[in-house]
Amino acid sequence: MEKLFVYALLYSEGFDVWASYADTLDMLFIENLENEEYLSLEMMRPKEAVLHSISVMYRSELDSEYFGKILMKSLQQIYKNISIEVFAKKMYSLWKKLPQHICKEEPFFTLSYADDCLSYGDEYQCRQLYEKAMYYYD
């Protein structure tokens, strides 16, 4: 489920990951055809499925390390393809959606403040902070 939660969060921030979300959901459903949660998600429209997935995430006991590895690996690809200003804005918004029990842990907490450096023109420091977070598990 952690992978599904990552794609739900990324999709909620406007990243084009619907195909990855749908593929992951299909795989989870095929592995467990009796799971009514997966069946319900399969029947929903993208926005509904993502919002529902995020609400399930809040009630779940995440494996924060596995979740973090998937999230940070996904962010590495996104980071390469958009401006630092857009990335920073979306990372703070994403951080606010993280479950309470992990949002204060590293590398997640970095997503809440790394954009501060941009307010005083220090793009280098901002990038350093994001890159340290994204490669935290490597």
Image (cartoon, rainbow, N blue to C red):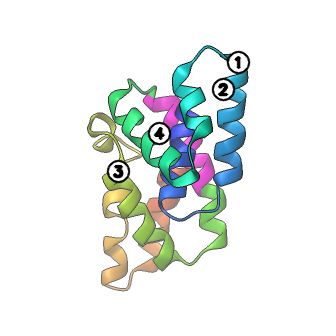
CA–CA distance between discs 4 and 2? Answer: 13 Å
CA–CA distance between discs 3 and 1? Answer: 28 Å
Q: Which of 76 and 2 is in front in this view?
A: 2
Q: How crowded is mark 2: few (under 14 residues within 10 Å), some or many (20 or more)?
A: some
CA–CA distance between discs 3 and 2? Answer: 23 Å
- In the image, what residue type sits under mark 2? Leu
Q: Nearer the viewer, residue 50 or 3?
A: 50
Q: Which mark is residue 97?
A: 3
Up-down relation of residue 53 to residue 94 (above or below): above
Image quadrant holding the N terminus, namely top right
**89 displayed left or right of 69:** left
Q: How crowded is mark 3: few (under 14 residues within 10 Å), some or many (20 or more)?
A: some
Q: Earlier in the sequence, mark 3 or mark 1?
A: 1
Image quadrant holding the C terminus, namely top right
- Magenta span covers which residues? 64-75
- In the image, what residue type sits under mark 1? Glu
Tell me the residue that label 1 is attached to: 31
CA–CA distance between discs 1 and 4? Answer: 18 Å
Up-down relation of residue 101 to residue 113 (above or below): above
Tell me the residue that label 2 is attached to: 28
Q: Can residue 39 be seen in this view?
A: yes
- In the image, what residue type sits under mark 3? Lys
Q: Earlier in the sequence, mark 4 or mark 3?
A: 4
Tell me the residue that label 4 is attached to: 53
Residues under numbered marks 4 and 2 in contact, where contact means CB atoms less than 8 Å apart: no
Q: Main secondary structure of the magenta part?
A: helix
Query: Looking at the image, which residue is at 32% across and 58% down?
Result: 112
Q: Which of 119 and 28 is in front in this view?
A: 28
Query: Looking at the image, which residue is at 61% across and 51% down?
Result: 74
Query: Looking at the image, which residue is at 53% across and 32% down?
Result: 2
Residues under numbered marks 1 and 2 in contact, where contact means CB atoms less than 8 Å apart: yes
- In the image, what residue type sits under mark 4? Ser
